[in-house]
Image (spheres, rainbow, N blue to C red):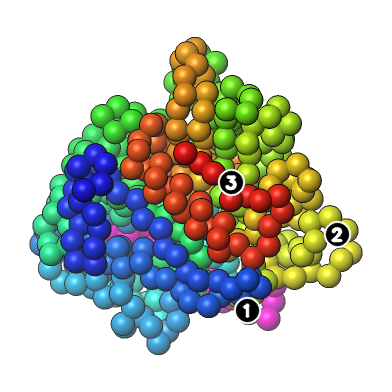
Amino acid sequence: MLPGGLLAYSPTTVAWASKLAFFNRPVWNGSGRLVQPDALLHELWAMILDDTVDGAEVRISMSGWDLPADQVATEIVMTSLRGAVARGCDVKVIAPTLWTNPDPADPDNRPMWFNLVEGSALHWELEELLGDNIRYWRSGNAITRNINHTKFILTPQAQGESIQADWVIATGSCNLRRRDLDRTNELVLFGGRPGLYMAFESYWEALWAVCGGYSPSFYSEIHEEPALNTRLFFLPFSKENPPPLDPGAQADPVLDLLGSIVPGPEASVRVAMATWTNNGRGREVLAKLMELRQQGCDVRVIGHHETQVFEREEWQNCPLDPLAGDDAPKVGKCETSQDVWRTMHGTIPWAKSQTHTKFVLVEGPVRRGGVVANHRIVLGGTMNFSTPIWYEDKGMTEIVLEFLDDPYMWDQYRECWHWLCRQSWETWGAPDGPLA
């Protein structure tokens, strides 16, 4: 038994009390190149679809989705999606933006990770399968002027061989792309919490509405689930209608958490982050981490840099040496920018990894509600450090998860942190330091 009464996961059984966390673990070598992908999280998506009760609703929102033409008929999630529709399930999908007439040879006119190629085999299969029950993302709407960055699936009842639970929710950093088999992601599963389910469903309904050209009344929310010591942030927020906050709290969940730490050697901070540039909000987060480190906190960071390039983005290329100038040879792909590596180097221990996760672990004295006490806090979800939280600043749709003093979640994320450190291919300053 895991803490909180949860039964351990096996390939054939998931029993529910409240929540579970999973991480896929693709293997990369010491040169920053892929050895073996890991489809665990896509298998879990398929498991939810397979075990949804016949005729029940299924609601999906997906930021990135791609498949080679020769895999559309056999890929595990598509197979399970077809099965759910065949069993009479009411499946509705918010899909990525359609991209028309991409030209792979033209860097200014080709599909990005948040696009679904119009006319592709995947596009036509989804159209034929779902008909009016699929809508494609529209930027510049009443919720966000940017992309939809959420990745979640909802069903009110699952009673199958693998999952037996009501109000099933799965969310995290994992898209339905081939690349998400190659990089470490998280998937958090909730069950048995109708209030939490309704919060997700309301958010999904708002996203669905704007995809249809409507302006929903629902905008953004911070949802409290006290029985789980869990908070969820449904973003972006609006400066004209900000969410209610405790006195002294910040709307930004990351900056609020970092700002609540009581500086000193008793406090530890661990960061695993994919996309992070040293400007805007990313600069604010980096400055706060540097400040905490200089004040004696144990701060360590895992960022993204691969030497093997699967999809080329010029702005995501950087040298191997964090102190190299802009004219140095670029190697691979780094979603964590060279300026972030350069700024951290010599102050914050760091590791270069393939990670696509976006989480922060804080342990030690934290001020919450005006009271200082020792806590263990996990912050995870879909939100990169570079993304604004405000609608007015072109913040994306995002879901951020916060777990307070949850032994199970702490252990799951802490173990992922240590595994990422062991898998990293270049480090400075011993980033794999101890966490209790």
Marks 1 and 2 sit apart, C-alpha to C-alpha, by 33 Å
Residue type highlighted by circle 1: Asp
Q: Secondary structure at mark 3?
A: loop
Residue 324 image label? 2
Which one is earlier in the sequence, the residue at label 1 or at label 3?
1
Residue type highlighted by circle 3: Gly
Which one is earlier in the sequence, the residue at label 3 or at label 2?
2
In the image: residue 263, left or right of residue 339: left
Residue 202 image label? none
Front in this rendered view, residue 336 or 416: 416
Is 202 in the magenta? no
Magenta-tinted stretch: 91-108
In the image: residue 118, left or right of residue 341: left
The residue labelled by disc 3 is 433
Residue type highlighted by circle 2: Ala
The image quadrant of residue 162 is bottom left
The image quadrant of residue 39 is bottom left
Front in this rendered view, residue 159 or 85: 159
Q: Secondary structure at mark 1?
A: loop
Residue 342 seen in this snapshot: yes
Q: Nearer the viewer, mark 3 or mark 2?
A: 3
Residue 152 seen in this snapshot: no
Q: Are marks 3 and 2 in contact (CB under 8 Å)?
A: no
Marks 1 and 3 sit apart, C-alpha to C-alpha, by 46 Å
Marks 3 and 2 sit apart, C-alpha to C-alpha, by 26 Å
The residue labelled by disc 1 is 103
Q: Position of residue 390 (x, y in %)?
A: 57, 35
Residue found at x 24% / y 71%: 80
Disc 1 residue crowd, few under 14, some 14–19, many 20+, Cα 10 Å: few
